[in-house]
Amino acid sequence: MAQSLGSVVLSRRAILGAAAGALWAVSRPNIVVLVSEGHAAEHVTPDATPYLAALAAQGLRMEAAFTPEALGSPSLSSLLTGLYPLRHGAFEEFSFARRDLRFTWAHGFRDLGYRVTLAGIPQFGPRLAFPFEYQPLSSVQRYLRLRHEKPFCLVVSLPPLEEFAGDTMDVWAAPPYAVDTPATRRWMGRYRLALRGMDAWIGDVLPLAREAITVYTSAHGPALPFAKWSLYDAGIRVPLLLRWPGRVQPGVSRTLVSLVDVLPTLIEACGGAPASLDGRSFLNVLAGRTAEHRDHVFAVLHNKGSVSGSDSPQRAVRTAQHKYILNLKHWNMFGNAWWRGNDGSDSRNPVRTPPPELWREWMLRAATDEHAQNRVGLWRSRPPEEFYDLAADPQELRNLAPDAPPSMSALRAALLDWMRSQQDPWLSFAEAV
């Protein structure tokens, strides 16, 4: 019998293994999930992250995986609940989910007989809604070497990327969505060094998880404008790697998935079936039985909860080819920790938050460079609607919304329907655009 939101339904199919999915699933495999912040999906490479690149080669690399919000707390809460931010309640940066949630990651795996542990600093809460066994990050290797009396599910919440950076004078190429200046290249150099530091830490852990289902993902993209704090692909498209020896064949999947899908997928892989989630299991994709999963993924942004954040809520829907963004209070100037006043003086860390001189260089370049002028202007002042053809314009540099192409209206309708289903309190703003 199906139960309310917050329970695991162990169906007859799941218990007896009568259906094909249950026959394929292994009963109670160990699980290790590694979650970082600020890692761009395209930067899982032998140069930037050799150990993660090896993990990708050993398992399935999900090339079209998206977070529902490019902020740490909302993204992690969505991963751990299988719900979109408006349903779990943590839709602002540094915010906590609803206290009355009865089904989260810890509940689901505990009900299946697992020891469920969170190692690291939890950037989500409250603990009442996430009843993990909490341990420090330093315990991970010891934990994986233990002889556990029952299967375990270990979620590792990695520190912010800058804690792996150290000092460097390196530079790295600026991404196309940014403005190419010396400060941008220096920031990218520190970002690459941080990736290598994080990857080295993960490299010490991966051999200990060799027999487990091992998952790696990131809460959002890099802390640059048009990445974190945005609904552009640089912010919401995240790495998602899954290794399951003997079960998942190595390869690359371009199937659209959301981080809300990870929890129901792993629950089903272990013989359960969660009820009333936004996420959908993609176990059939892992099994190689289909390449189809979602036609659309959805994302939100609530910038007001960020440090110095303006009231600039946004919504987006993405398909394999198109992206539609609604800027619900487009008359408000967009700003947050990256911009305070006119110089970015609220910046505190050169990897997590870009330094003030980076923004000043962007503004100076905008006086003579059309690309820089476009970037600086769009970051501060958003149009009511944005529409991008991702096949022709993967960097989302040309907004086609003013021409109102026919395909845009269909996406707008899909987004409004989704907002209604989420009981989105900003729906009236969307309908007025």
Image (cartoon, rainbow, N blue to C red):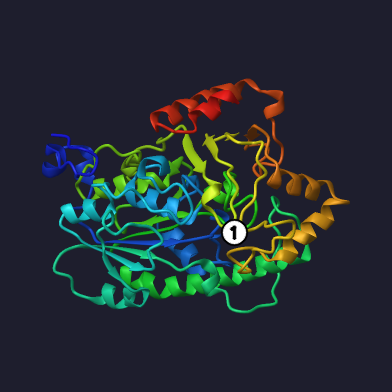
Residue 181: x and y in percent read 78, 61
Tell me what residue is drawn at x 14 percent, y 39 percent. Answer: 11
Residue 180 showing in the rendered view: yes
Residue situated in front as seen by the camera: 346 or 15: 346
Near mark 1 (Cα within 10 A), the count class, few <14, some 14-19 or many ≥20, is many
Residue 213: x and y in percent read 31, 59
Mark 1: amino acid: Ala
Task: Classify mark 1: helix, strand or loop.
Answer: loop
Quadrant including the C terminus: top right
How many numbered badges does the structure rendering display?
A: 1
Tell me what residue is drawn at x 50 percent, y 41 percent. Answer: 300
Q: In this view, does 310 lie above or below 147?
A: above
Residue situated in front as seen by the camera: 335 or 256: 335
Tell me what residue is drawn at x 55 percent, y 40 percent. Answer: 313
Residue situated in front as seen by the camera: 254 or 163: 163
Q: Mark 1 points at which residue?
A: 223
Residue 83: x and y in percent read 36, 43
